[in-house]
Amino acid sequence: MEKTRAFTLAGRMLKNLFRKPATTQYPFEPADYPERMRGHVRIEIKDCISCGLCMRSCPSGAIAVDRKAGTWTIDRFDCVQCGSCVSACPKKCLFIEKGYTEPDSIKRSETFTKPEE
Ligand code: SF4
Ligand code: SF4
């Protein structure tokens, strides 16, 4: 019994010696995110009609829409990547993309302005 176990262990060790590592050298190598990862929200601002539905559907109050100024603002540190804004947008100009928000020592928001027509 003990001998069989030792052989199994040795076999596993040998196999693992020639296997590609399961881990990556992040941050020295770029992270390989899964295709359907909920990383961050992206807006295609030129298609936005400033209806504010995304803002109203956001459970954490991370979005602010200013119809007069034509701006769309997101506080990425308040966003929980739930995707509710993406589902609510009638113009389909919001997307959840892979890749995390860059870490920062200051909580700041990001504003996008609709281009002049
Ligand atoms: S993904 Fe969720 S939390 Fe983030 S902005 Fe959209 S609705 Fe708000
Ligand atoms: S729901 Fe879509 S179209 Fe409406 S304000 Fe938000 S991003 Fe713009």
Image: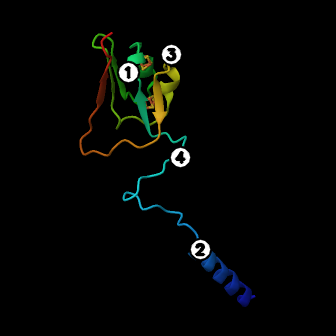
Answer yes or no: do the residues labelled 3 and 1 have beta carbons within 8 Å? no
Does label 3 or label 1 sit earlier along the sequence? 1
Residue 26 appears left or right of 91: left
Label 1 sits on residue: 45
Query: Type of residue at label 4?
Result: Pro
Q: CA distance from mark 3 to mark 2?
A: 51 Å
On the image, the x and y values in percent for residue 42 come to: 41, 30
Mark 3 Cβ and ligand 2 under 8 Å apart = yes
Please tell me how crowded label 4 is: few (under 14), some (14-19), or many (20+) other residues with Cα within 10 Å: few
Label 4 sits on residue: 34
Identify whether 22 is placed above or below 50. Answer: below
Give the secondary structure at mark 4: loop
**The image quadrant in which ligand 1 is located:** top left
Residue occupying image coordinates x 46% and y 61%: 24
Front residue (pair 109, 112): 112
- Figure quadrant of the C terminus: top left
Q: CA distance from mark 4 to mark 2?
A: 24 Å
Label 3 sits on residue: 90
Does label 1 or label 4 sit earlier along the sequence? 4
Residue occupying image coordinates x 48% and y 16%: 91
Q: CA distance from mark 3 to mark 1?
A: 13 Å
Front residue (pair 77, 49): 49
Which mark's residue is nearer the viewer, 4 or 3?
A: 4
Label 2 sits on residue: 16
Please tell me how crowded label 3 is: few (under 14), some (14-19), or many (20+) other residues with Cα within 10 Å: some
Q: CA distance from mark 1 to mark 2?
A: 49 Å
